Every structure is written in C-alpha cells, then in structure tokens.
Image: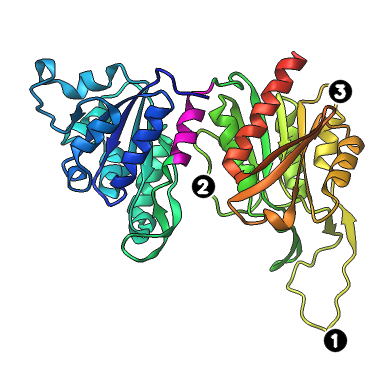
Amino acid sequence: MTLGGKKILLGITGGIAAYKAAELTRLLVKAGADVRVAMTEAATRFVGATTMQALSGQPVWTDLWDARVNDAMGHIELSRDRELILVAPASADFMAKLAAGLCDDLLSTLCVARRCPLMVAPAMNVEMWQNAATQRNAGTLRADGVQIVGPASGGQACGEMGMGRMTEPADILADVRFFFQPRRLAGRRVLVTAGPTEEPIDPVRVITNASSGKMGYAVAAAAREAGAEVTLISGPVSLPTPAGVARVDVRTAREMFEAVKKGALGADVFISVAAVADYRVKNPSAQKIKKANGHLSLELEENPDILAWVAAQPKPPFCVGFAAESENLAQNAKAKLAKKKLPLIVGNLAQDALGRDDSAITLYDADGEHPLGRGPKLELARKLLEHVATRLSAKK
C-alpha cells in the first residue's frame, strides 16, 4: 500500500545509525507520506538538519523553545496533526527516557505529550541492547503500547557483532505500511499454539520436537496487530510474550490439549503452530533412569491430535494447521488438509525454517496453493493473517 497523505513525525536521536534516517525519510516521502522531522541535539552531530529538511521538504525541528511555534508550545502543536510518531534511530538513553516518562528536550516531550501511536527502532551497541536496564525499558515500552521495530543482528560501527543494529530503512517502511493497514481481525478472538511439547521419560529426560516457537509467536503478534483478542498457548521456549497477547504456558501435549479445549470453542480462529510430540512415554519413571547395559526400551502411546479434535467440533473455529515437512511438501500438506478437514494449512520445509528468523511458506486451501515466498517470520505471519481475514469475510 502507499502512504499517500499519511502524516508522520520522524524523530531522530544521537547515534551513528542516524545516517539511515536520511534514507528512511526518502523512502517515506517517496511512498507518499507527509514527513515532519524532529531531532535531538545529539542527532545533529551525526546528520545535518539541512539534509533532513531537503529530504522531507519541511522545516526541521530541534529546539523546545523554537520561536517559530505559536505560544512556544512545539511539544504540543508539532504532533497534534500526526497519525504516527516514529523514532529511528532510538538510542538506549532515549528509550530510558520514554520508559520513565522523562522529557527534557523537544523530541522526548513530543513523545510524552502525544495523542497518536508511537513506534521506535532501537539502535545501539550489542552490550547496551543486552543490558538488563535496556531490556527492562523495552519491556515497559511494549507494555505501554509502544511498537518496537527490531533491532537487527550483525556488524556494528564499533566493530563488534550482535543484536543492536537499527532495522534497515526498507524494513521499517514495511512496518509503517503495515501499521496503516485496516485492523481486519478487530473483534475476533484468535487462539494460537506455539513451541514444542516435552513428554517426560524420567525427571531429567524428555521426548520432544525441535521447535523455537518463533513462527507461533510471530503469528500471535500479527493477529494482535490485526486487532484480534489473542491467546497464546505456549510450550517451553525462551521468547518474550508479544505485546497485548495473553499467554498460557504448558509443557506436555496433554496440558496443551486441556488448555486448547478451554479456549478453542470460544475462539473465532484457531491456529495450530505448535510442534506437538506425537507420542509420550506410557509409564515415565518417577526417578532418574540409570544406564544399564547400554540399552533402554520405552513403551510409547499416542498423544491426542489437538487440531483434529478442534476441527471435528460441531461449530469449530476457523482452523489453520501447519505442516512442517522434510520432503514432498505439497503432497504431504494437501493430505493433512484433507485428513483433518481443515479450511487452510500452512506448509514449510522444516530444514529451511527451524530456529531461523525467516522462512518460506505456502498456503493450501480449497482454492489451491498460495506461495508467500521467503521473508521474516513476522512478515509471513502478517500475510497469513491477511489471508485468514479474507476467508473469514467471504464466509460471513
């Protein structure tokens, strides 16, 4: 979509990534946005106000006491006609200010006095990003409804490697475009399962499926962005809960099944992303099993098929399954679609996606195959939810 006429205030804070704000401004303006730029004093040491004025086509604002603003209330007037405030880059210091509600310059005061949504793109050294205080501040901002874009991982200006790079301008533009899309799942209730399950062998050993949970968490985040009320039932993973999502933690397939039974029948959409273990140990040991002659025999029994149970209910929610295959993707995904009588299934090759931040997926439904290509998992999740919303509208 274009950003024709969308009014954005772009905030720039101090850091070497400020040079990327020039390209971001160019992209936003090219997409049709009305971009007003506000810079901190530190930002002007990395990129000139004249550059940003030339790219945005508007005066650049840096001073809380700028005489050009009526009544010296720039912190009020400069944001009142804006639909979004985007701070890119957002330094660790600036994020700390936002989290604490501090406002001692024009940009921070604009953010605290805003009426419109706020999006920030962090940029800092890897150690600064991983610092406990920065992570607390990021968590506070998410809880306050601030959308955090990135950061990305890679080489940094200081020569170190790791998380903290500002997301590339083209990717931030994609997030801004998505922000302005209609909330097509507003009023809908979406239930998502994610991550693996663990089936105990004894107190220290388990049977499990390899899963990072990243795709399921991306789906939950995308559903929330689309306006849905989202519940995420998660197996054991080390991922933060997406903002605005209710999370239920489980361990075993049976625990996940019980949690799904409580939530599925009140849901409009059920998206089964979790890599549920197909089998569990029939009689797990209460004590750690000791090695004996190098052999161990386990008697396994089948776990419940959670997705099939939900789809078989008299009035099921719109059910979406996932088929992570190692070969014959289309054949296996279509077979699963038919066997479980699903309206939609998502197929991907496990070896191309496991543990990665990107993937390549194809949707299968009664209308055929719909390749979504390769991209970040959140971007693919957004496309998936758009397809779901379209199917729901057609069904209605």
Q: Are marks 3 and 2 in contact (CB under 8 Å)?
A: no
Q: Tell me, yes or no, whether the highlighted magenta stretch contains residue 117.
A: no
Q: Residue 116, image x and y in percent?
A: 36, 22
Q: Which marked residue is nearer to the observer: mark 1 or mark 3?
A: 3
- Under mark 2, the amino acid is Pro
Q: Which residue is mark 3?
A: 314
- Under mark 3, the amino acid is Pro
C-alpha gap between disc 1 and disc 3: 52 Å
- Under mark 1, the amino acid is Asn
Question: Residue drawn 37% across and 28% down?
Answer: 29
Q: Residue 76, image x and y in percent?
A: 21, 20
Which label sits on residue 329?
none
Characterize the local packing of mark 2: few (<14), some (14-19) or many (20 or more) Cα atoms within 10 angstroms. few
Q: Which residue is mark 2?
A: 240
Which label sits on residue 293?
1
> Quick check: 253 above or below 131?
above
- Numbered disc 3: secondary structure: loop
Q: Which residue is nearer to you in this view: 8 or 23?
A: 23
Which numbered disc flags the more N-terminal residue, 1 or 3? 1
Instruction: Indicate the quadrant where residue 233 lies.
Output: top right
